[in-house]
Image: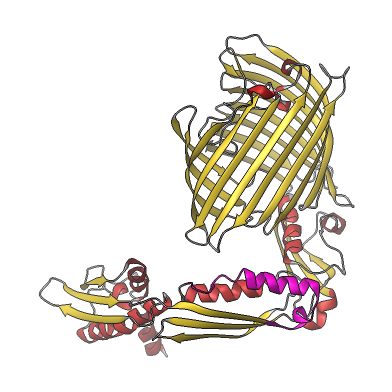
Amino acid sequence: MIVLGLALTSRCGPSVADVAAQAYKVEISAPDPVKAAVERSLDLVRWQSYAEITPEFFDLLVADARSQARDAAEAQGYFSAKVESDIDRSTTPATVRLRIEPGEPTTVASVNVTVAGAAAQGDAVGGGLIARLQKDWSLPKGAVFRQADWAGAKTSAVQVLAADRYAAAKLTESRADVDPETHSAALSVTIDSGPPFRFGALDITGVQKYSESLVRNLVTFAPGDPYTAEALQIFLRRLNGSGYFASAQATVGAEPTQADAAPVHLRLIEAPEKKVSAGAGFSTDTLYRAQLSYDNFNADHEGLRFHADIDAEAKIQSATLRWTLPPRVPQYSDTYSANVAHTDISGLRTNEFTTGWKRKTAAERDQVSYGVAFYASQQLPTNAESANAHALFFEYTRTWRNVDDLLSPTRGYAVNAQIGAAPPGVSTAALGRGIVQFAAWLPIDTRTALTFRAEGGAVAARSARDVPIALLFRTGGDTTVRGYAFDSLGPRIGDATVGGRYYAIGSAEIVRWVAPAWGIAAFVDAGNAADRTADLKPVYGYGVGARLRTPIGPMRLDVAYGEEVRSLRLHLSVGLSF
């Protein structure tokens, strides 16, 4: 057994203890996609730095390289590849040359995706899911048949059912008939949906400092509700984001016999009750940043969360105190906060104070929040008269999200609407304020998508000087109009950009995903802020960027040209705006 183990190791590749000298060189001649795949697949490439290789093993590696190269070419869709090899012993070290003529790529000629089981019995939900997985099949007719794409398409198709109602969905048959003469592949897939699942009882382990009722108040489903993976993920996000737990994991019993009441097993690890953290960073909007914060997640021993932080940025310095009550049923959370801030942005210095209460519901697809806050601000524009204002502001917000993924959507739309008012007597002057934001994601094909964004707002007040700066509008920067400095767009007073009573923004972006996790983008933004609607004239920014999918949403790195200022700017942002 020991001898066999050593033999297997030698065929897998050299170890870190092997001599680093080069035994031979490998030169591969092939088109780039095939060449890269072959280089990753050859044992011959992995062994070339091992100087102690024997002549017999070297000849075996060269012989194996031809079949491995053909296999790699087939995985890229080239089933008629011709591979030749020779050894040039006149060089030092010897050179092994592989020449690969891939021929024509094999393309998908037909696709037949069949679903059996309860989903195919005429139920509206099941029928909709079947139509969706067939429409979204990621290896369509005409595409190059690659093994990785074939495996991914099957996994994704099963996941459409498994993530919504049919937790026990599985692939029962798949077949790819490849015709080397016509360079075509006929694909056939059969998926068994199994029965529709419903949530059953919640089984909780790992809770000691907190009561189980605190956990149950965060649940986004009830026993008897149809099972969806999204409902479970929202629940886990609420648990992980609450601060009470360091880890939350949940599994659903996927046995078909338990489909009518599938138990949910929740495993929790509680976080430390108190935490002090410090950090430093950089933002392309507000430049350098340092932060010190303190959290107590059980301040009253009943789940009251207390947070305090000091945030020092190049353009903004602030201090915040926040108290968040434990979640309640029906599902909502109450937050009380106080904040003081000093800003110096685009020639406008401000001193601000805010304190208030906000209640937010838990439903992420149809979320409501409302509250009241007292705002007071002092505006100090460069080379202009200062202004002081305060307001007791009542606000109501509602957000609708009809998207395929809440963190990184590729299809659907989201709408956010805000309306608020400040009464006279307790405010410098009576005011009303409204904002509407809209975003839409439209896939063009499996790797390309369009994103549209539009938003606008207005403040009804006798003068902008009577409105706290936090309730007025400036724009420009990473998440609004790229190509312009943060909050640099708006009405000008003296040498400063100040807040206006109106704003409007529009954006169109196309993203091509080169790999599952990253892509490239091109975009155009337009927008501005003004104190009169007649002055609300858009300025434009456009450019290109890179995209990276992360667990907290898409990361964007953009280079944008601001047409009005005739300069390039770098922008970095993460996540969604609303």
In percent of the image, x 67 and y 11: which residue is there?
A: 386
Q: Quadrant of residue 119?
A: bottom right
Q: Is residue 22 magenta?
A: no
Which one is in front, 528 or 167?
528
Residue 496: x, y in percent? Answer: 58, 17
Q: How is the image coloured?
A: secondary structure
Residue 467: x, y in percent? Answer: 75, 20
Location of residue 285 with respect to 50 vertically, above or below? above
Q: Quadrant of the C terminus?
A: top right
Residue 252 visible in the picture: no
Residue 452: x, y in percent? Answer: 62, 47
In percent of the image, x 20 and y 73: which residue is there?
A: 24
Location of residue 552 with respect to 140 vertically, above or below? above
Q: Quadrant of the N terminus?
A: bottom left
In percent of the image, x 73 and y 49: which residue is there?
A: 243
Q: Quadrant of residue 166?
A: bottom right
User: In this figure, what is the number of numbered marks?
Assistant: 0
Q: Is residue 118 magenta?
A: yes
Extreme-front residue of the structure: 534
Which one is in front, 342 or 400?
400
Location of residue 91 with respect to 191 vertically, above or below? above
Residue 79: x, y in percent? Answer: 39, 82
Q: Quadrant of residue 426?
A: top right
Q: Which residues are magenta?
A: 115-143
Residue 194 visible in the picture: yes
